[in-house]
Image (cartoon, rainbow, N blue to C red):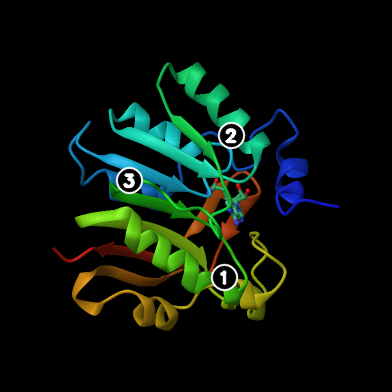
Amino acid sequence: MPKPADFWNDRFAAEEYIYGEAPNAFVRAAANTWCPGEQDILVLGAGEGRNAVFLAQQGHTVTAVDYSAEGLRKTIRLAGAADVDVTTLEADVREWTPDRTWNAVVTTFLHLPPADRPGLYTLIRRCLRPGGHLVAEWFRPEQRTEGYTSGGPPDADMMVTPDELREHFSGEGIEQLDVAEPTLNEGMHQGPGATVQFVWRRPE
Ligand SMILES: C[S@@+](CC[C@H](N)C(=O)[O-])C[C@H]1O[C@@H](n2cnc3c(N)ncnc32)[C@H](O)[C@@H]1O
């Protein structure tokens, strides 16, 4: 019986970092607003660890969650090469019940089917301390419907719209919600992409 993580374990089995070793550009820019070492950060769907390791290099305390053991193995390897600590946790975000909170949640391209996304948004809100920030980037449906070739899941319904985020995250907390078209340069993601870039602050 195949496990849900098999697809990603197969993809991450190669020794090369398929999304590269450098952080996602939106995460890098958002992290520039944080003082070094001030954040206790949860990275959801951390993959091979590029964002988690970058954030740890900024002195932050980082927990990386993913259901792919191969991704977490590469996260630990990347952290070792950078001489930083990242706590890894193998968990399926659709079932995981965290026993603590963080003052930031970071997630990039964690694409779930429509039925699972409300649960992801609830998890994110629960993981954040009051005043804490979510920094997130997903592909928008236009990534498929307008023929972009820079990656992402095959189905447009796996993508995220700004309206969906407005529905699940209170308006008072929205600090940035951009319909973006970045030029991606991150391993398999190359070239123009249709994304939504989101920063939300959990109200006190
Ligand atoms: C497109 S990759 C992005 C990886 C990383 N965020 C990055 O940008 O480099 C999607 C990641 O989400 C993880 N993922 C997908 N569904 C998940 C789930 N239900 N629970 C935990 N991780 C999941 C995959 O294992 C994979 O690492």
Per the image, label 3 sits on a secondary structure element best described as loop
Q: Which residue is mark 3?
A: 100
Mark 2 secondary-structure assignment:
helix
Tell whether circle 2 marks a residue whose Cβ is less than 8 angstroms from ligand 1: no
Q: Nearer the viewer, mark 3 or mark 1?
A: 3
- Indicate the position of residue 173 as horizontal and vertical percent values: 21, 70
Q: Nearer the viewer, mark 1 or mark 2?
A: 1
Q: Relative to 47, is 118 above or below?
A: below
Helix, strand or loop status at disc 1: helix
Q: Amino acid at mark 1?
A: Asp
Label disc, if present, on residue 187 of the rendered structure: none
Q: Amino acid at mark 2?
A: Leu
Residue found 17% across the figure and 66% down from its top: 203
Q: CA distance from mark 3 to mark 2?
A: 20 Å
Establish whether ligand 1 lies closer than 8 Å to the Cβ of label 1: yes
Quarter of the image where one finds residue 60: top left
Q: Is residue 92 above or below residue 72?
A: below
- The quadrant in which residue 167 appears is bottom left
Tell me, for residue 116, which label it has, or none: 1
